[in-house]
């Protein structure tokens, strides 16, 4: 039975497996899957959730086992499954680590591709793009899938998603450190996400998807050029699938959903689901034309939206947005605004008024709006080492270890990470 707009939700949360003592990446995801399936399966059903492999063998993905009718209650399900995976990883000498990037992983040295089922796909990606880099082997995210039925619903949803994408790093950035250094970006994962497939530009586009509003137009303008361009590098046709599309949100016509891909993973499932709920509430408001007609939303060009995304990738909630038309789309009538203030407005006027808004999600939103997204809190937690951290320089491994060990505890205990007062 087809699900209408917002009748089904899919969530996918990716976590790193690291060594308990050193927090170095530990490529044993296949051993975890073997422990529950008796074989090196790529996916194992666990009731309402499922576990699956990813490109690299130190990452495991937890996801809804088919569409869920609502987001409420998923945080507890994911938290329980995190505990189950943690119990299996523990005797292997490991633990689970959250955040969108390992702070000191060396991809050239530490990358181990998943070697079992689906391995031909990963080897093809590696051969064409080279996967021993941060943009491939050191990034973890949340994927949010939202159902639609037919072209009319797809058009409304896709127009709304394009508008919300640039604001997501202001709420969800969690990757300020790579190679043991501050990168100068709050969302370093997003920066490398852009670089992944530059060899074949049609695959990723400008991250913000083009303004297309029907299945036929999407296939002609986005999917077909991408399939044609990669064909010379993929003679066996292994990658000729919708998931090859690397835009920040992609249409999954195989399951009638739009999949948002640029949400950095957070410190615990409650934070992840709270952010997914906030994004969904804003999308509902846009689709219902709370601030402006859908026709106006459809007319936003890609480049201005991309400019806002670049700003929030750099500065997250502190990014200054001076696009009056863009602010107006969210009911803000000002010449400019901080991205964090935009979210303050959206939480107060839309998110907090939703009937499903739980006290746990309210606590997450309060923390993000007061202390900043997780990336900002991580940087603040490191400021004791060197005041007013700016620029790229090496951070003390011991201090990084302490902060990320605390983040691992937050994941296992499903609690929010707070920056020091």
Image: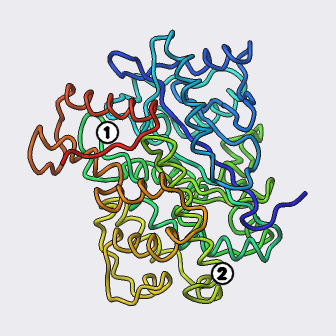
Q: Position of residue 148 (x, y in %)?
A: 76, 65
Q: Quadrant of the N terminus?
A: bottom right
Residue at 20% from the left image edge and 44% from the top image edge? 420
Residue tagged by mark 1? 178
**Which of the two residues, 218 or 379, is positioned nearer the viewer here?**
379
Residue tagged by mark 2? 288
- Of badges 1 and 2, nearer the viewer stands 2
Tell me the CA gap for discs 1 and 2: 40 Å
- With respect to residue 166, does 337 lie above or below? below
Residue at 62% from the left image edge and 82% from the top image edge? 298
Residue at 69% from the left image edge and 76% from the top image edge? 156
Q: Position of residue 91 (x, y in %)?
A: 51, 9
Q: Residues within 10 Å of mark 1 (few under 14, many from 20)?
A: many
- With respect to residue 367, does 23 lie above or below? above
Q: Check the image and name the residue furthest to the top.
A: 91
**Which of the two residues, 232 or 362, is positioned nearer the viewer here?**
362
Left or right: 167 with respect to 232? left
Q: Check the image and name the residue furthest to the right.
A: 1
- With respect to residue 12, does 153 lie above or below? below
Instruction: Tell me which label, 1 or 2, sits earlier in the chain.
Output: 1
Per the image, label 2 sits on a secondary structure element best described as loop
Left or right: 230 with respect to 370? right
């Amino acid at each position: 039975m087809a699900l209408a707009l917002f009748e089904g939700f899919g969530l996918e949360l990716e976590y790193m497996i690291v060594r308990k003592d050193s927090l170095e990446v530990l490529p044993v995801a296949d051993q975890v899957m073997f422990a529950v399936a008796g074989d090196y399966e790529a996916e194992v059903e666990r009731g309402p959730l499922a576990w699956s492999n990813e490109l690299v063998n130190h990452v495991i993905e937890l996801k809804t086992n088919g569409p869920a009718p609502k987001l409420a209650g998923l945080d507890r399900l994911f938290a329980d499954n995190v505990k189950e995976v943690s119990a299996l990883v523990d005797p292997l000498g490991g633990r689970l680590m959250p955040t969108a990037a390992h702070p000191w992983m060396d991809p050239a040295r530490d990358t181990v591709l998943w070697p079992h089922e689906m391995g031909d796909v990963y080897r093809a990606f590696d051969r064409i793009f080279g996967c021993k880099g941060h943009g491939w082997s050191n990034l973890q995210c949340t994927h949010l899938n939202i159902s639609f039925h037919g072209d009319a619903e797809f058009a409304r949803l896709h127009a709304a998603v394009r508008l919300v994408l640039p604001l997501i790093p202001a709420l969800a950035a969690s990757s300020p450190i790579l190679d043991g250094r501050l990168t100068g970006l709050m969302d370093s994962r997003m920066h490398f996400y852009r670089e992944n497939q530059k060899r074949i530009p049609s695959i990723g586009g400008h991250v913000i998807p083009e303004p297309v509003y029907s299945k036929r137009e999407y296939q002609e303008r986005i999917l077909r050029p991408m399939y044609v361009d990669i064909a010379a590098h993929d003679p066996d046709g292994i990658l000729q699938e919708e998931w090859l599309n690397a835009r920040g949100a992609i249409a999954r016509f195989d399951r009638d959903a739009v999949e948002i891909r640029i949400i950095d993973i957070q410190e615990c499932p409650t934070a992840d689901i709270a952010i997914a709920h906030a994004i969904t509430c804003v999308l509902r408001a846009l689709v219902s034309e709370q601030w402006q007609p859908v026709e106006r939303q459809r007319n936003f060009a890609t480049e201005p939206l991309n400019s806002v995304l670049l700003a929030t990738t750099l500065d997250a909630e502190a990014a200054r947005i001076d696009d009056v038309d863009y602010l107006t789309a969210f009911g803000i009538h000002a010449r400019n605004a901080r991205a964090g203030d935009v979210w303050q407005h959206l939480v107060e006027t839309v998110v907090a008024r939703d009937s499903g808004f739980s006290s746990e999600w309210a606590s997450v939103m309060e923390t993000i709006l007061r202390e900043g997204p997780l990336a900002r809190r991580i940087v603040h937690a490191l400021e004791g080492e060197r005041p007013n951290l700016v620029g790229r320089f090496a951070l003390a491994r011991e201090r990084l270890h302490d902060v990320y060990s605390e983040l691992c505890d937050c994941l296992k205990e499903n609690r929010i990470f707070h920056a020091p007062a």
